[in-house]
Image (spheres, grey):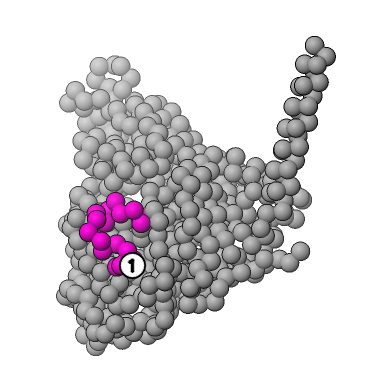
């Protein structure tokens, strides 16, 4: 028995030594490595076929485009192109490429890569419908010389310079090998021209980048970036506090209640800033329950959005009424949000033919019960709590709602396939809006019009606005479009919420620009 106790004692001592060694290893890690939290694993890292925000945040540092937006002014500026020319009829856009730029594998970047990327974008067999829509009016991309390309439009488009300048570019010599572009091996092993190059992807755990030694611009001070995939936000916060993460986007409760200690504020910066974004509940109009706009209005009026904002998000955000960024010139501030009014909502539902005809406590119409399922991403704590509130509030008026929870990749696939009754999600918007991708009726099958919104006047406005270069006229058009969306309620628009980001104070020159944070300009503090 004594020997057994001694053996146990030695095992405990050994474990403590191992754990102590692990702690010391973490504390003496390479100071030039930046550890970033991401809440879900991206499907892949091909900028032509991915439209996930997480993938985009990583690709920004691997891939580049002809033009970029200045972090402060948001004006377009050269990146892979050195300059550009626009014809007087606004149909021809010529770009002069910088020379001596190389892909991270050492092959030169040329006009051939632009031509190839455009060809892939237009290929009907490539699964990138949300991107295709922006290039529908581009007739051709012509190689003038190895370092000059010209885009030709069929008709003027007010965003043409930005769309041409931001075309996602992949290396022709890698992807043009006869294999399926959608499932190409390099979708998970990207090769770009940016400041960082891809190294490894440890599925479910990490994605690692290192400084691209062939990068044409100034080399960043941070030599390595490790994205840590941690779905559970409370686990991520504990890792942040232990020094295992340097950057994390917080939940509101973490921002308000869990990161205000003196020790935390001595170790981390806390940044709150707004980006073009809103979240929403989308009603799939293919489901007969949601075909009537009055029913959709009633559902919105059953949701106490301000109370939910205050209780779940600690008031950090603003209730929105439509499809544009609330701080954008196109947003119509004259529109008043539909009120929370369960009594009025009941009346609207009754006028629409919904009543509890058989006394079972559930509304019905033509022998069809008002039952549906809300689809949410399982990693979203906000979506989980929102869904619980909705389930209870809808039940009070005789609507039965179930909740389906899916891991992120499955969730995205279901949304893409329109395999849902209702869904809660968010949109990251561009700095200059064009609602075509999200709201034009042509996008209900393969674009991002997931909820089957179809309205002839809305289509007409969207199409006319694309050809309108007068900003004031376009503002008037888009504000009318906002009115239509508000009247139709294809979404219950929820909130524009701020980014709540913490960054380790072991870095200097951490600046919040209008565009957000830029890791390439951060400096490692010298110990």
Which of the two residues, 127 or 338, is positioned nearer the viewer here? Answer: 127
Farthest right residue?
A: 2
Residue drawn at (49%, 35%), measured in percent from left and top?
Answer: 385
- Eyeballing the image, is 91 above or below 259? below
Q: Report how many numbered discs are placed on residues in the image.
A: 1
Mark 1, residue position: 171
* On-image quarter of the C terminus: bottom right
Secondary structure beneath label 1: loop
Magenta stretch: includes residue 263: no
Farthest front residue?
A: 3
**Which image quarter: residue 190?**
bottom left
- Using residue 239 as the reference point, say whether residue 15 is left or right of it: right
Residue drawn at (38%, 31%), measured in percent from left and top?
Answer: 403
**Which image quarter: residue 326?**
bottom left
Residue 165 percent coordinates (x, y): 34, 74
- Eyeballing the image, is 141 above or below 308? below
Residue 172 percent coordinates (x, y): 29, 68
Farthest bottom residue?
A: 88
Residue drawn at (21%, 85%), measured in percent from left and top?
Answer: 89
- The residue stretch that appears in magenta: 169-187
- Using residue 122 as the reference point, say whether residue 25 is left or right of it: right
Decide: few, some or many residues near mark 1? Use Cα within 10 Å; few <14, some 14-19, many ≥20: many
* On-image quarter of the N terminus: top right
Residue 344, visible in the rendered structure: no
């Amino acid at each position: 028995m004594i020997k057994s106790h001694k053996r146990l004692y030695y095992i405990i001592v050994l474990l403590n030594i191992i754990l102590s060694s692990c702690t010391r290893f973490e504390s003496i890690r390479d100071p030039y490595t930046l550890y970033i939290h991401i809440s879900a694993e991206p499907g892949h890292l091909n900028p032509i076929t991915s439209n996930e925000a997480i993938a985009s945040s990583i690709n920004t540092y691997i891939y580049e485009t002809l033009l970029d937006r200045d972090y402060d002014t948001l004006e377009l500026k050269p990146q892979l192109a050195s300059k550009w020319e626009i014809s007087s009829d606004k149909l021809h856009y010529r770009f002069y490429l910088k020379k001596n730029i190389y892909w991270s594998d050492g092959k030169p970047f040329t006009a051939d890569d632009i031509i190839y990327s455009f060809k892939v974008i237009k290929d009907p067999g490539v699964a990138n419908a949300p991107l295709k829509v922006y290039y529908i009016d581009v007739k051709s991309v012509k190689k003038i010389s190895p370092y000059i390309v010209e885009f030709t439009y069929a008709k003027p488009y007010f965003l043409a310079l930005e769309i041409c300048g931001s075309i996602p570019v992949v290396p022709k010599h890698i992807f043009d090998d006869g294999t399926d572009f959608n499932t190409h091996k390099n979708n998970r092993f990207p090769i770009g021209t940016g400041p960082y190059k891809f190294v490894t992807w440890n599925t479910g755990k990490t994605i690692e980048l290192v400084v691209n030694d062939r990068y044409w611009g100034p080399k960043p001070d941070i030599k390595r970036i490790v994205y840590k995939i941690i779905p559970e936000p409370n686990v991520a916060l504990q890792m942040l506090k232990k020094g295992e993460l340097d950057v994390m986007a917080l939940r509101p409760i973490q921002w308000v209640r869990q990161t205000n200690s003196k020790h935390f504020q001595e170790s981390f910066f806390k940044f709150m800033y707004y980006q073009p974004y809103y979240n929403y509940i989308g009603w799939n109009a293919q489901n007969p329950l949601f075909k009537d706009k009055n029913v959709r209005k009633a559902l919105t009026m059953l949701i106490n959005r301000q109370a939910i904002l205050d209780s779940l998000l600690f008031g950090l955000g603003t209730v929105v009424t439509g499809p544009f960024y609330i701080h954008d010139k196109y947003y119509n501030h004259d529109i008043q949000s539909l009120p929370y009014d369960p009594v009025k909502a009941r009346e609207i539902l009754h006028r629409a033919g919904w009543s509890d005809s058989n006394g079972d406590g559930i509304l019905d119409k033509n022998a069809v019960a008002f039952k549906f399922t809300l689809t949410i991403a399982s990693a979203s704590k906000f979506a989980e709590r929102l869904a619980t509130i909705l389930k209870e509030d809808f039940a009070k008026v005789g609507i039965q709602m179930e909740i389906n929870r899916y891991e992120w990749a499955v969730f995205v696939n279901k949304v893409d396939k329109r395999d849902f009754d209702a869904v809660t999600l968010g949109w990251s918007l561009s700095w200059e809006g064009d609602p075509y991708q999200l709201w034009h009726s042509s996008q209900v099958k393969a674009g991002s019009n997931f909820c089957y919104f179809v309205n002839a006047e809305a289509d007409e406005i969207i199409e006319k606005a694309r050809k309108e270069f007068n900003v004031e006229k376009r503002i008037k058009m888009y504000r009318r479009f906002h009115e239509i969306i508000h009247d139709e309620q294809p979404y219950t628009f929820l909130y524009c919420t701020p980014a709540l980001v913490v960054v380790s104070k072991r870095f200097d020159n951490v600046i919040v620009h209008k565009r957000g944070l830029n890791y390439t300009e951060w400096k490692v503090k010298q110990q």
